[in-house]
Amino acid sequence: MIQPFCPVVILHGIFGHKGNWIDIAKEIAEKTIRKVYVLDMRNHGDSPKSPVMSHDANVQDLEKFLRKLNTPCVLIGHSLGGVAAIKLAFQKSNLIKDLILIDMSPLRYPQNTVHLILKGRRTLEELLLQLPTDIELVEAQNMLEKEMNKLITYSSLNKIVCSNLDKSESGWKWKANLEVLETVDFKAMGSVFPLRGIYKGRCLLVHSDSSGYVIPEEDYDRLKTQFPKINIVCLENCSHWIHMEKPDELTHSIVQHLNKN
């Protein structure tokens, strides 16, 4: 009897949600003949809101979901989701068949992204109040994105932030729980780096050439000690948000890696 391929689980980054990964997930499913699950992390997307936001809480959420699968999975993590993936791989490697990291490593966790958003939170709230309530979601997102481009120079980050826009009976709202995220001590969350541990399973790292999360001349040798079976792919001319700027190249790298199995 032919055994089915193990499923794929995708975790987004800070301020993202599962919707940002749907197209990539569909292509992975089609080209590798696997089930693909895309999760919303706590305080993001459609997940329940919680006053607790920490790396350990994210790892516990992830472990709880993976145990429900009742089979080891391919775990894909970007940014904040990559941190949870790495920590779980170091702690409970039996739950993971294959680890794929998107612009994240155990060596460092730059916080410039978080501060960019939270610094402009008041402006975001003000922009929400200015949006007409009688327009469609796509039009509202486009209007919001034009204003966001005046505040933040990263267009991919702006698209992700604007994709959090949602509509309720009382008007426009954010999917991401900005109130809780604003209270998180991200400096303390970053202080746990570098993460200690070894994952002996197969690992793929796809990183940007310029985001600062992975630095080739400094990091490659150290990464190989923590991930002995690591394969590293560097994509040029893109930022930390590879899945938004180079979705085809990223998907190709993931599919090629999985189909080698």
Image (cartoon, rainbow, N blue to C red):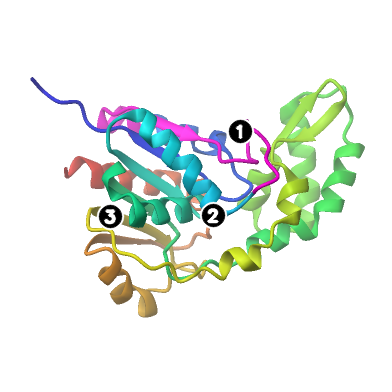
Would you call the spot at circle 3 few (<14 residues within 10 Å), some (14-19), or many (20 or more)? many
| Numbered range of the magenta stretch | 27-52
Observer-side mark, 3 or 1, equals 1
Q: What residue is shown with label 1?
A: 47
Horizontal side, residue 212 vs residue 1: left or right? right
Residue 27, image x, y percentages: 37, 32
Label 3 residue SS = strand
**Alpha carbons under labels 3 and 1: distance apart:** 28 Å
Q: What residue is shown with label 2?
A: 55
Task: Give me the residue at 64% from left, 61% from top.
Answer: 113
Horizontal side, residue 156 vs residue 99: left or right? right
**Alpha carbons under labels 1 and 2: distance apart:** 16 Å
Horizontal side, residue 79 vs residue 157: left or right? left
Task: Give me the residue at 25% from left, 60% from top.
Answer: 230
Q: Earlier in the sequence, mark 2 or mark 3?
A: 2
Q: What residue is shown with label 3?
A: 203
Q: Measured along the vertical axis of the image, is residue 107 above or below residue 19?
A: below
Q: Earlier in the sequence, mark 3 or mark 1?
A: 1
Residue 140, image x, y percentages: 78, 33
Residue 70, image x, y percentages: 30, 29
> What mark, if any, has residue 112 been given in the picture?
none
Q: Tell me whether the residue at label 3 lies in contact with that at label 1, contact meaning CB atoms closer than 8 angstroms.
A: no
Residue type at mark 3 is: Cys
Residue type at mark 1 is: Ser
Q: Tell me whether the residue at label 2 lies in contact with that at label 3, contact meaning CB atoms closer than 8 angstroms.
A: no
Residue type at mark 2 is: His
